[in-house]
Amino acid sequence: MWRIAAALRGLAVAAAALLTLTALPSSASAGTAPPPSASSSPPPSARPKEFVALRTVDPTILQEMRYFTPHNFTGVPVDGYRRPTCLLTRDAARALHRAQRSFLRRGFSLKVYDCYRPQRAVDQFVRWAKDLGDQRMKAEFYPRVDKTRLFDDGYIAAKSGHSRGSTLDVTLVRLPAVPTRPYVPGEPLTPCYGPKPDRFPDNSLDMGTGFDCFDTLAHTLDPRIRGKQRTNRLLLKKGLERAGFVNLPEEWWHFTFQPETFPDTYFDFPVE
């Protein structure tokens, strides 16, 4: 009897495997199937042990977490940022620490504007982009871009690499650092691509534009960026590349450590 039972169990396993294989997409359709990140299931809402607060790895790196404040392109604090804290995967944080040691020897410090970004924050960006009546921050962050173009031009998307935990927005500050003054909601705004003395004050080196500037001048190697501004961008880029980071060509401040700890997972736990 046990031999018959074992045979029946074997047939059941084989049948289950056959059903699984027939449910998989064929090679012709596999390329069009949505990636795991685009599934309808909610993103993970628990913080994995692989995520760390950057301050625990390198307390010398400056943090100016813009989305915790109203000084960002939406004009309000962003959902999911409960503390002005940089969270990263441990591998990315350690790599950033290596880069910081090199910059400190040259009289500079890294400063992060954003690190891990919850999916709920990305969702808020999408809702904001669809609200064409909300133009309160246009004069600073997207003066030359019509808001109807934000999706088509790639400035806003439904998913962000930041939600995977190995991407950050970062700049360089000359030491000793002078604090950046707080933004006052309702104050007059000036274009993010204007001369540095005319832009919102930032203790960052002059990179040619401010952070989160929706403009082609923010492209890392835009040929119109020359002289000291180009030198500063390349200083940041090369220093981070030596530590294993890859720059997004459309944003001089945007870098991803590779290989990513979670290359296919978009998280939604809050920053706290």
Image (cartoon, rainbow, N blue to C red):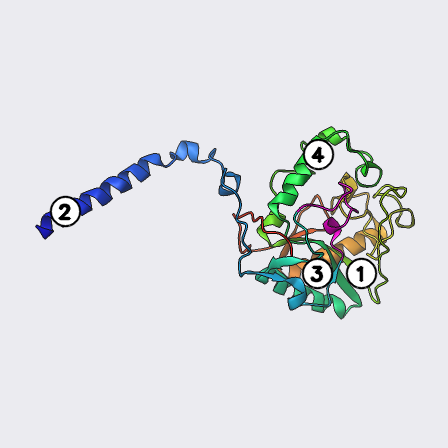
Write the start and end of the magenta stretch as one range. 64-79
Q: Nearer the viewer, mark 4 or mark 1?
A: 4
Q: Could you tell me if the residues under marks 1 and 2 are in contact, i.e. CB atoms within 8 Å?
A: no
Q: Is residue 73 magenta?
A: yes
**34 lies left or right of 126:** left
Q: Could you tell me if the residues under marks 4 and 1 are in contact, i.e. CB atoms within 8 Å?
A: no
On the image, numbered disc 2 is attached to which residue?
A: 7
Can the viewer see residue 222? no
First-in-chain label (3 vs 2): 2
On the image, numbered disc 3 is attached to which residue?
A: 239
Q: Amino acid at mark 4?
A: Ala
Q: Could you tell me if the residues under marks 3 and 2 are in contact, i.e. CB atoms within 8 Å?
A: no
Secondary element at tag 4: helix
Q: Mark 2, residues whose alpha carbon is within 10 Å: few (<14), some, or many (≥20)?
A: few
Q: Amino acid at mark 3?
A: Gly
First-in-chain label (1 vs 2): 2
Mark 3–mark 1 Cα distance, whole angstroms, equals 13 Å
Quadrant in the picture for residue 139:
top right
Quadrant location of the C terminus?
Answer: bottom right
Give how far across and how far down residue 258 sits, in percent.
58, 55
On the image, numbered disc 1 is attached to which residue?
A: 173
Residue lying furthest left? 1
Give the residue at x 19% y 46%: 10
In the image, residue 3 sits, relative to residue 55, either above or below, namely above
Of helix, strand and loop, which mostly describes the magenta segment? loop
Q: Nearer the viewer, mark 3 or mark 1?
A: 1
Q: Nearer the viewer, mark 1 or mark 2?
A: 2
